[in-house]
Amino acid sequence: MNVPAALKRISDTIWELPVSYKEGMLVPARIVASEKLVNEMDAGVFEQVSNVATLPGIQRYAYCMPDGHWGYGFPIGGVAAMDPGSGVISPGGIGFDINCGMRLVLTNLTAEQVQPKLHQLVDRLFARIPTGVGCHGFVKLKQDDFRTVVQQGSRWCLKNGFATQDDLEMTEEGGCFPGADASHVSEKAVERGYNQLGTLGSGNHYCEIQVVRPENIMDRGLADAFGLTTVPNQVVIMFHCGSRGFGHQVATDYLKLFLSVMERKYHIKIVDRELACAPFRSPEGQAYFSAMKCAVNMAFANRQVILHRIREVFSDVFHAAPDELGLRMVYDVAHNTAKLEKHLVDGTRKELLVHRKGSTRAFGPGLPGLPECYRETGQPVIIGGSMETGSYLLAGMSTGGDAWYTTAHGSGRTMSRHEAKRSFRGDKLQREMEQRGIYVRTDSFGGLAEEAGAAYKNIDEVVETTEQAGLSKRVARLVPIGNIKG
Amino acid sequence: MPFEYRSDIAHADVAFDAWAPTLEELFREAARATMQVMVENPEQIRQAQTLALKLEQENEEMLLFDFLNELIFYKDARRLVLLPGEMSITPSDGGLTVRATLSGEEIDPTRHEMGIDVKAVTMLRYKVEQVAQRWQATVVLDV
């Protein structure tokens, strides 16, 4: 057990490391977890979330969500809001895979209709959506066009026939983060990424076909509102990917820049070089914020063109137009971002720079920035579990304000990739999953073994904790039947 | 064994230690450890293309950081999996300069056992140092 003696229980789901825990902490660090989950947290979570609490300008608490685990800089599951005037922006609080995120898409097909065509469907998705190491995409662009894509995100997709207006409305920020200026992005980042629009990537990135079974609906009203009850055993599609090499290069470029100016120019001392940062209002901080927005837009556009391809595949296999098959988006959420948002601090509404790394924005009912149709329900929150166990759709709650309306993003790893690979064999796992009714295709059996369900925390416990903590309410559990993995 | 993957400092990422008698060999081992995450049978990488690389940095740590990032860059930009051949690291005005040839080929899933994409070299526990006549590095890769 790695739990520090200084960790205090605040409630059944909130644990706190006080500012006395580590020199330089400006605010306490809070971990959202059940007793079981907190006892199972790896040592990195306590070390890293308390490091985050030392960053200049941090407000209220440094947070870690219940799926938290060892990351770099911030823990995965980390959340920190900075005062934009006195605080910093840190790429280590956003991650290399900027706007890695999840998209959930409805169909009006039942599991019974899909089952006879499942192999064909998964094989066709696997053939048509590029996956795996260094994959190049199906949208061929010149480098200058790619610069337009990263400035416009899903709006570029709409203009070029890869999106509907409704898709944009169902995406955080309308699929285009304003203020993205490609002049803040290196040539290297463009060269690295311009061939990768429409690629899934690898690791924990996937596209999954799932079923909403009636017994797995936890909130009927919200499930109705989110479109999960059109038919019994409704089939939905969930996928997870990010900004690919472009975003990774943006993060690397600015990590290096911040390391070179942080102490010398801004006299900021940090406890971990992965927390390299710059004052948000400095030229370097603003340049990174703008470059990061470009990567956010690349990821929105990437998921959008992948959705276009998914629609084509379903259309081909079921001989019907995407509209007839009800291929509509529920929502698209971002995991790795920093955003300016207005939140209540000591009774006053204040603009804050909210870093979320491996965590999901979960706006409660009535908050500005949600599409009209979700004003009363709260924001749909898509939480992907391991490929063996299942995923969840949840809704943001009005009680989430303390944690800046943020919740978990996945089930969270408990076993290192290296250990998982030693414990499981990808080809055997593939056969066992098929026997259990999950047909999976992959480029990498090694990668598949690393994603085994047993390498992850119990997703049911993670999402239940977020509900008890008042962050996100469970709507339905989604069970996988088909999966493509990079 | 000149490099070893570690389970104790990263869960979702890939960590390794590498060591060698010279700095050039350390770079070679770190390159192999990085490439093997993506292509699990790096001995199958044919030397079909060769590129010349020259990088300058203020110290060994940042030089290895940039060097590994070049391999990751070519994997994305040109789908090339590359390993270093000839290499020299010499003092220069700006600190240290590495000159290397990188050889390899385009990713070929029919011969390469594909692993997972390396996204970046992180600064987590990152270290390059000389201890008792031996160069050693600890690297955590984001995957």
Image: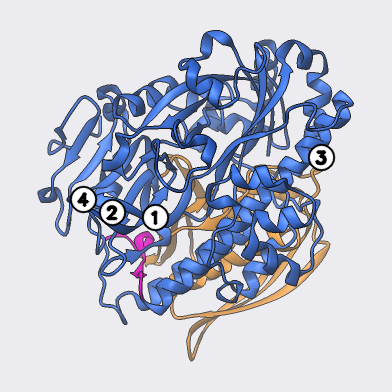
Chain colours: A blue, B orange
* Residue assigned mark 3: A128
Q: Quadrant of residue A330?
A: top right
Please report contact status of discs 1 and 2: CB closer than 8 Å, yes or no.
yes
In magenta, the rendered stretch is: A271-281
Q: Position of residue B17 (x, y in %)?
A: 45, 52
Q: Position of residue A95 (x, y in %)?
A: 46, 54
Residue on which the image places disc 2? A52
* Residue found at the very far bottom of the displayed protein: B93
Residue at image coords 60%, 25% = A227
Tag 4 and tag 3, C-beta contact below 8 Å: no
Please state, as top left, top right, bottom left or bottom right, where the C terminus of chain A lies in the image: top right
Q: Are marks 1 and 4 on the same chain?
A: yes
**Which image quarter holds the N terminus of chain A?**
top left
Camera sees residue B75: no
Tag 1 near tag 4, CB within 8 Å? no
Question: Which one is nearer the viewer's eye here, B12 or A308?
Answer: A308
Distance from the alpha carbon under mark 1 to that under mark 4:
16 Å
Label 3 CA crowd tier, 10 Å (few <14, some 14–19, many 20+): some
For image coordinates 30% across by 51% down, the residue present is A343
Q: Secondary structure at mark 4?
A: loop
The disc, 3 or 2, on the residue closer to the chain's N-terminal end is 2
Q: What kind of residue is marked 4?
A: Arg
Residue A233 falls in image quadrant: top right
Whole-number angstrom distance, CA of label 3 to CA of label 2: 41 Å
Circle 1 sits in a helix, a strand or a loop, which is it? helix
Whichever of labels 4 and 2 marks the residue nearer the N terminus, that label is 2
Compared with A459, B52 (above or below) is below
Q: Secondary structure at mark 3?
A: helix
**Number of the front mark, 1 or 4:** 4
Distance from disc 1 to disc 2, alpha carbons, whole Å, reads 8 Å
Above or below, A387 relative to B85: above
